[in-house]
Image: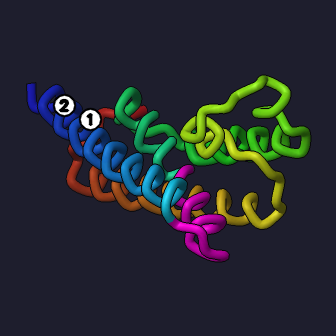
Amino acid sequence: MSSTINIKRARLIYAVIFILLFAVEIFIGMYVHDSFIRPYVGDMLVVILLWALVRIIIPRKAVWLSGAIFIFSVIVELTQMIPLVDLLGIDNRLIRVLMGTSFAVGDIFAYAAGCIVTACVDLILFHKRKIRGTTNDN
């Protein structure tokens, strides 16, 4: 029973993180037009946002998650080398912001930084649970 409560609590925490980061990402994408926050911090936060979304579904230990999100993010970035949003005829500003419209190598470094953050959070969280003996992860 305690394990079920812990999983529900974890999912709620990840959902709150996701909602907050989603709001921050929308704000950055629509209203911040600088040369650091929008291109780098926004990209770093987007992989943390994706991590939180997946963690809502998979709150247990998943050592592969940060790596998988990094690979996904790099693939999305590579699709920006061709103007995919233009080829698909997407005019919606929000969708264009979410998908991205231009390729930049620096974005890949920002994704890596965000994935390092999520990997460190996972290591810390699951190490603490292991020490306390509260994890049921394999």
User: Vertical placement of 75 versus 87: above or below?
Assistant: below
Residue tagged by mark 1?
11
Residue type marked 1: Arg
Point out residue 112 in the picture as x, y percentages from the top left corner. Answer: 67, 60
Location of residue 117 in the rendering, given as x and y in whole percent from the top left corner? 51, 63
Q: Residue at x 65, y 65 (%)?
A: 39
Find out whether the residues at labels 2 and 1 contact each other: C-beta distance under 8 Å: yes
State whether the magenta stretch is mostly helix, strand or loop.
helix
Quadrant of the image containing the C terminus: top left
Instruction: Determine if residue 2 is in view.
Output: yes
Q: Is residue 6 above or below residue 132?
A: above
Residue 119 position within the rendered picture, expressed as x and y whole percent measured from the top left: 52, 56
Above or below residue 6? Residue 32 is: below
Q: Residue furthest right?
A: 82
Q: Is residue 24 magenta?
A: no
User: What residue is rendered at 24% in x and 40% in y?
Assistant: 10
Pick out the residue farthest to the front: 91
Q: Residue at x 29, y 58 (%)?
A: 128
Magenta residues (range): 32-46
Badge 2 element:
helix
Camera-nearest residue between 99 and 58:
99
Residue at the extreme left: 1
Give the side of residue 42 with respect to residue 7, left or right: right
Secondary structure under tag 1 reads helix
Res 88 quadrant in image: top right
Residue 62 locus on image (x, y percent): 49, 38
Q: Sort mark 2 into few (<14), some (14-19) or many (20+) by Cα contacts within 10 Å.
A: some
Q: Residues within 10 Å of mark 1 (few under 14, many from 20)?
A: many
Tell me what residue is drawn at x 46 percent, y 47 percent.
Answer: 49
Q: What residue did someone put label 2 on?
A: 8
Q: Considering depth in this image, is 84 or 118 the residue closer to the camera?
A: 84
Q: Mark 2 belongs to which amino acid?
A: Lys
